[in-house]
Image (cartoon, grey):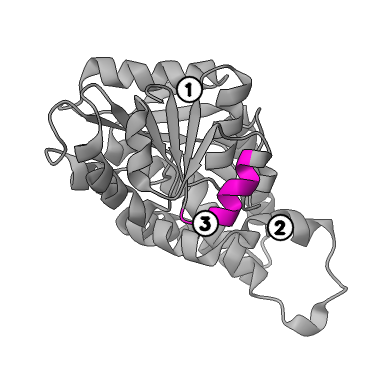
């Protein structure tokens, strides 16, 4: 089988990519994963046309979506690219971009392109059983080509995501990482810190507020540790900005300053409304 789509890493995002592509006739879809049992379950669940534990099986496709943890994406691309046919486009769904792009720039065969991608969609749930064919509908996908990226390859990736129901926006890898440090990585870090603050003996005394604000803390520790480390500098800057705002709350509380507290709360609400539109 030649042509079609290959998905490397059939978890929640990879499974959703595969399922969405099949539902929209963008296949055939080849699924690659190290877990043979999970692959077979995904194939039986109609997510895949072909399932393989051999990475080079993805070389039969003309578009490959790498849905692995961010610390594995560059290595997978470097291992796979030499087996790919001329004109193959590699992309990914990783939530950091600068380190991945830097690791691949100038190191792939000249007729194989890599275009960084990041769909702003997902869940704290894990695994292909939670795959959703409409996960990307009306969601934004950030595309991070560089001056060295072939325009045709960037357009190929954008066309794929639009066919999945998403909209696309181009950014540099560095712009991307600075933005998601504040809008994605910092919220996860804060949710985890908050979830770890109350002692266990308060079990049974939590309600919707605690559950809603700590939902992100249910994500995989290994996955998010890799993301934090991959975007360390931008995330450290984001943590600093958050610490400054938290200090304003602390100071207002210490001074018993009702006006300052109300202003901080109102500003947060206004900013949330503007960000979420």
Up-down relation of residue 190 to residue 200 (above or below): above
Whether residue 24 sits left or right of residue 239 in the image: it is right
Q: CA distance from mark 3 to mark 2?
A: 56 Å
Between circles 1 and 2, the one closer to the viewer is: 1
Along the line of sight, which residue is nearer the eye, 204 or 92?
92
Between circles 3 and 2, the one closer to the viewer is: 3
How far from the left and from the top, in percent, is residue 249? 60, 61
The verdict on residue 31 being magenta is no
- Tell me which segment is drawn in magenta: 34-43
How far from the left and from the top, in percent, is residue 9? 47, 47
Q: Residue at x 48, y 22 (%)?
A: 161
Q: Is residue 232 visible?
A: yes
Query: Is the Cβ of the residue at disc 3 closer than 8 Å to that at disc 2?
Result: no
Q: Which mark is residue 258?
A: 2
**Of pointers 3 and 2, the one earlier in the residue sequence:** 3
**Of pointers 1 and 2, the one earlier in the residue sequence:** 1
Q: Residues within 10 Å of mark 2 (few under 14, many from 20)?
A: few
Along the line of sight, which residue is nearer the eye, 209 or 140?
140
State the residue position of label 1: 161
Q: Is residue 266 visible?
A: no
Q: Residue at x 38, y 48 (%)?
A: 54
Along the line of sight, which residue is nearer the eye, 203 or 245?
203
Along the line of sight, which residue is nearer the eye, 181 or 156?
156
Query: Is the Cβ of the residue at disc 1 closer than 8 Å to that at disc 2?
Result: no
How far from the left and from the top, in percent, is residue 253? 65, 67
Q: Residue at x 58, y 40 (%)?
A: 15
Q: Which mark is residue 35?
A: 3
How far from the left and from the top, in percent, is residue 185? 48, 52
Query: On the rendered image, what quadrant is the C terminus found in?
Result: top right
Q: Residue at x 13, y 41 (%)?
A: 107
């Amino acid at each position: 089988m030649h042509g079609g789509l290959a998905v490397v890493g059939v978890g929640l995002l990879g499974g959703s990519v595969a399922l969405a592509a099949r539902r929209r006739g963008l296949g055939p879809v080849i699924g690659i994963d190290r877990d043979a049992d999970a692959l077979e379950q995904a194939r039986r669940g109609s997510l895949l046309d072909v399932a393989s534990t051999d990475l080079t099986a993805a070389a039969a496709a003309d578009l490959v979506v790498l849905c692995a943890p961010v610390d594995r994406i560059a290595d997978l691309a470097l291992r796979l690219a030499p087996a790919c046919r001329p004109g193959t486009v590699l992309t990914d769904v990783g939530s950091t971009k600068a380190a991945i792009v830097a690791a691949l720039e100038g190191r792939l065969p000249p007729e194989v392109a890599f275009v960084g991608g990041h769909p702003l969609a997902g869940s704290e749930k894990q695994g292909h059983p939670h795959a959703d064919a409409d996960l990307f509908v009306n969601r934004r996908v950030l595309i991070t080509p560089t001056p060295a990226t072939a325009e045709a390859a960037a357009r190929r990736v954008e066309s794929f995501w639009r066919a999945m129901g998403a909209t696309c926006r181009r950014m540099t890898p560095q712009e991307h990482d600075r933005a998601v440090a504040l809008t994605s990585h910092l919220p996860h870090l804060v949710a985890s810190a908050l979830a770890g603050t109350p002692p266990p003996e308060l079990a049974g005394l939590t309600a919707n507020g605690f559950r809603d604000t700590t939902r992100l803390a249910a994500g995989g520790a290994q996955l998010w540790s890799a993301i934090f480390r991959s975007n360390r500098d931008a995330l450290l800057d984001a943590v600093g900005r958050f610490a400054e705002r938290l200090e304003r709350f602390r100071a207002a509380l210490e001074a018993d300053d009702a006006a300052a507290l109300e202003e901080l709360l109102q500003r947060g609400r206004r900013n949330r409304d503007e960000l979420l539109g």
